[in-house]
Each structure stands twice: as structure tokens, then as C-alpha cells.
């Protein structure tokens, strides 16, 4: 499902003394099947954009098109349930939103709230619990008897059970150790491929943006600063540093290596193996000369 933002502006508490401009003139397209990462400092507008993607917020200017539905400023929108069914959001610490007495009931809650029958919801629960790497017998357990990692997977299963066409990830690895972070990010990437999802990742992690995304949008002070492929975005690491953003570790290592050696490689590498090959090749050229 395609998504398009056209000159979107959003003001919190508009037309009050507490009015605050969050984003302005934001325009970009997300073609169906894209894995898009949105990066930027805290306060850059990332989370505000996220909440527009399933109409939790609606523009104070501009418009957003989600599939066949256009949500435009100045127009009171009704019947947004279909949009919210198609766009699933995994918020930070999704395990905090678990509340039912069993895992199965928690997963079934979302689909049934959208009109799915109990039998169909239970069928979906059995399917998605395996997709997130948990066994079927966990469905009868209380979610509060599970480990933190298991609880997060159950919460993710609840979003998947609604069978969204788009999945939005708001810092989905917050609070996880490096191993847990990689497991969750690999899980979402596998789901992205298997289910042909449109995936939108809001993250502070440059490593995750570089490794998983097809396209990256940099937000800065409420506006789109730059958009491009990971290769395009990280080809100018100094620009990111000037914005106060980190760069992937492999890019940072390459920058230090080039400064130390006094020469530059032909491009910035996002993969350690490729960087190693390029360094070895260049070193052989220097030794040979």
C-alpha cells in the first residue's frame, strides 16, 4: 500500500496560547513494499510523522494519502477504522500495552475489535505466535508470566494478527541488549520480506537504518532535511555529524582509517566485509607501487 505525504504541517494545540509547530512542509512518498527508516534528533518530528501514518493525528496543513484514502487538513475525517486496520504501529515498549489474562486473548483483542470473528482471531493467533518465534503452547499462559523478550514478541504478534499492509516501528528495540535488538530487527526484516509489508522504522540507531532500510528520511527541526538510499545518506557522514547525528560504526571506522592513512577509499561502505576487502585491495596497490 502506497503512502504519500504532501506539504504536511502539524501544530499541537493549534489556535491556543500553547500552540507548538511540530512539523512543516513535509513531503515524501513511501511506495508499497518499501522499508523506510526515519532518523533524526529527539524533537525533529519523527514521532509526529509516525502518528499521521494511521491518522492518530491529522494534518493542520497539507494532506496524506494512505492507500486509496486521502486525509486532508480542514476536513473532518470519519470512518478511519479501515486505515488503522491496514497500518499497524508497534510503539516503544509494546509489552506495556498487554492487559488480557492469556496471551491468546491479548492477540485476539485487536482483530476482534475490528470485527473479526473469535474463531478467525484464534486461528490468526496460532499463526502469528509462530511468526514471532514463540511456541503455540504459550497462548494459554498469562502474558505477565513471560520474560520481557517474550512479552515484546507477544505484543508484536497482536499487531500482526490484524494483518496490516503497513507496519510502523517506533524505536522497537528500546531497552534491549545487543543480542535482543538484533533478534527483533531480524524478525521484522523477515516479516517484511515474507508478508511483502511496507515497513517504516523510526529509530535513533544508524546501524539499523543502514542495515535494513531501502530508503532513509532525515528529519531536522520539523522538516525533511534529506532523503535517499542508505548509500546516499551515509556517503556524506560529516553532514550527519554536523546535525548532531551518529553514523554507523563501520562508516566511523572508515573515516578514522582514512584520516590516519592520509587517503580516501572510493566510497563509504556500510558492510564490514566489503570495507575490509576495499582496504586490503588498496593496501596491495600501495605496496605494489
Image: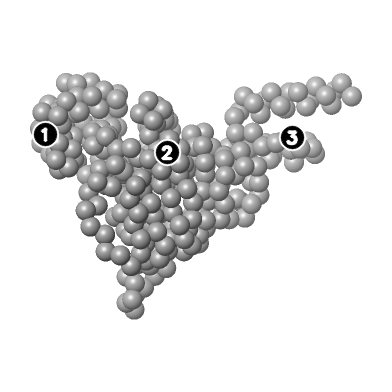
Identify the image quadrant of the C terminus. top right
Numbered mark located on residue 266 in the image: 3
| Eye-nearest disc, 2 or 3 | 2
Q: Nearer the viewer, residue 212 or 152?
A: 212
Q: From the top left corner, tell me how far across and down residue 53 is, in percent.
A: 36, 50
Q: Is residue 116 at all visible to an observer of this figure? A: yes
Image check: 195 left or right of 276? left
Image check: 83 left or right of 254? left
Q: From the top left corner, tell me how far across and down residue 39 is, in percent.
A: 49, 48
Q: Is residue 43 at all visible to an observer of this figure? A: no
Mark 2 / mark 1, whichever is N-terminal: 2
Give the class, few, some or many, for how many residues have Cα within 10 Å of label 1's Cα (few <14, many ≥20).
few
Q: Quadrant of residue 5?
A: bottom left
Residue designated by label 2: 32
Q: From the top left corner, tell me how far across and down residue 140 is, in percent.
A: 12, 26
250 in relation to 113, above or below = above
CA separation in Å, label 2 and label 3: 33 Å
Q: From the top left corner, tell me how far across and down residue 258 is, in percent.
A: 74, 38
Residue designated by label 1: 117
Image check: 281 left or right of 101? right
CA separation in Å, label 2 and label 1: 28 Å
Q: Nearer the viewer, residue 184 or 36?
A: 36
Amino acid at each position: 500500500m502506497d503512502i504519500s505525504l504532501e506539504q504536511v504541517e502539524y501544530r499541537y494545540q493549534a489556535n491556543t496560547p500553547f500552540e507548538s509547530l511540530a512539523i512543516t512542509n513535509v513531503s515524501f512518498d513511501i511506495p508499497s513494499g518499501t522499508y523506510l527508516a526515519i532518523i533524526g534528533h529527539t524533537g525533529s518530528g519523527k514521532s509526529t510523522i509516525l502518528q499521521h501514518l494511521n491518522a492518530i493525528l491529522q494534518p493542520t496543513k497539507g494532506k496524506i494519502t494512505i492507500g486509496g484514502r486521502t486525509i486532508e487538513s480542514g476536513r473532518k475525517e470519519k470512518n478511519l477504522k479501515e486505515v488503522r486496520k491496514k497500518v499497524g504501529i508497534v510503539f516503544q515498549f509494546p509489552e506495556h500495552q498487554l492487559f488480557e489474562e492469556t496471551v491468546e486473548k491479548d492477540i485476539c483483542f485487536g482483530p476482534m475489535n475490528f470485527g473479526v470473528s473469535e474463531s478467525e482471531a484464534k486461528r490468526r493467533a496460532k499463526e502469528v505466535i509462530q511468526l514471532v518465534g514463540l511456541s503455540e503452547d504459550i497462548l494459554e499462559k498469562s502474558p505477565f508470566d513471560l520474560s520481557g523478550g517474550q512479552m515484546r514478541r507477544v505484543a508484536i504478534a497482536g499487531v500482526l494478527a490484524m494483518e496490516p499492509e503497513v507496519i510502523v516501528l517506533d524505536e522497537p528495540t528500546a531497552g534491549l541488549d545487543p543480542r535482543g535488538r538484533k533478534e527483533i530487527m531480524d524478525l521484522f526484516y523477515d516479516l517484511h520480506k515474507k508478508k511483502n509489508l511496507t515497513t517504516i522504522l523510526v529509530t535513533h540507531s544508524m546501524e539499523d537504518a543502514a542495515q535494513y532500510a531501502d530508503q532513509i528520511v532525515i528529519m531536522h527541526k520539523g522538516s525533511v532535511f534529506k532523503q535517499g538510499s542508505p548509500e546516499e545518506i551515509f556517503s556524506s557522514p560529516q553532514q550527519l555529524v554536523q546535525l548532531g547525528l551518529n553514523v554507523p560504526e563501520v562508516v566511523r571506522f572508515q573515516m578514522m582509517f582514512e584520516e590516519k592513512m592520509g587517503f580516501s577509499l572510493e566510497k563509504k561502505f556500510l558492510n564490514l566485509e566489503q570495507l575490509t576487502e576495499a582496504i586490503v585491495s588498496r593496501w596491495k596497490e600501495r605496496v605494489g607501487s
